[in-house]
Amino acid sequence: SITDPDNNFLETNDSNNWAAVPIAITMQHNPLPATPINLVAASGLTYTFSFNNTDVTSWTWNFGDGGTDTLNNPATHTYAAPGTYTVTVIMTNPCGSITSTQVIMITGMEEQGNFSAVLLKANPNPADGTTTISFMMPESGAMQLEVYNLLGERVAVLDQGSKSQGWHNTTLDFDALGLSNGAYFIRLVTPAHYSVLRVIKN
């Protein structure tokens, strides 16, 4: 190399102006993937939920009725009354946070078994392809007869509108509705009554 009269450095070989320095990069935490809430168990009004994500440093459960939990996974919660609730869990680590939700329908079947037997019947139950749902209208008025899966998702409306007092029948065709084998809940709602019946498709 040489310098000119003004002391400027003149490089004669521009191909050697670098140096390789090894460095190690370590990921301290993994980004959280979007994963659904697992419904682990349900008995009457008590439900247990969990999430499968790992590398979670903190989380908050919100059970949709004002109840929360920041300590447990799985988390168990007992609801005060039947109804439809949105369960939410916010999972956090240093890479950020992610929220998962699930809507569930609490039927309280164990507490309402006798009442359900009076207003709702299914024949046959269990059933192969179809079953006849018989429901009692205690008084004339509006009604809705719905089908829910075990996740609390409404999958069909069998009947709705105004009905006279007394017994009525409708057919539940599992195959026509695209319902796979398993357990479902039939819910009858009238202005003054609420009833749930569990049906099984073989």
Image (cartoon, rainbow, N blue to C red):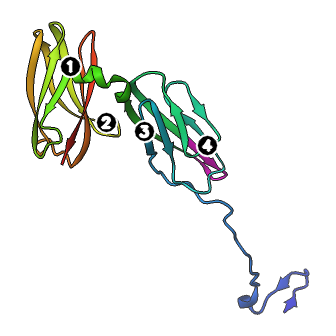
Residue, disc 1: 119
Q: Earlier in the sequence, mark 3 or mark 1?
A: 3
Disc 1 crowd, CA 10 A, few/some/many (<14, 14-19, 20+): many
State the separation of the CA atoms marked 4 and 2: 25 Å
Percent x, y of residue 71 = 65, 41
Under mark 1, the amino acid is Leu
Q: Secondary structure at mark 2?
A: loop
Q: Earlier in the sequence, mark 3 or mark 4?
A: 3
Under mark 4, the amino acid is Asn
- Of labels 2 and 1, the one closer to you: 1
Q: Earlier in the sequence, mark 4 or mark 2?
A: 4
Q: Earlier in the sequence, mark 3 or mark 2?
A: 3
Residue, disc 2: 153
Q: Secondary structure at mark 3?
A: strand
* Residue found 16% across the figure and 46% down from its top: 178
Quadrant assignment for the N terminus:
bottom right
Q: Are marks 4 and 2 in contact (CB under 8 Å)?
A: no
The residue sitting at the front extreme is 114
* Residue found 28% across the figure and 39% down from its top: 149
* Residue found 58% across the figure and 57% down from its top: 54
Residue 42 is labelled as 3
Q: Are marks 3 and 4 in contact (CB under 8 Å)?
A: no
State the separation of the CA atoms marked 3 and 1: 24 Å
Q: Earlier in the sequence, mark 2 or mark 1?
A: 1
Q: Is residue 190 left or right of residue 70?
A: left
Q: Earlier in the sequence, mark 1 or mark 4?
A: 4
Between residue 172 and residue 120, name the one nearer to us: 120
Report the magenta residues as a range.
90-97
Residue, disc 4: 72
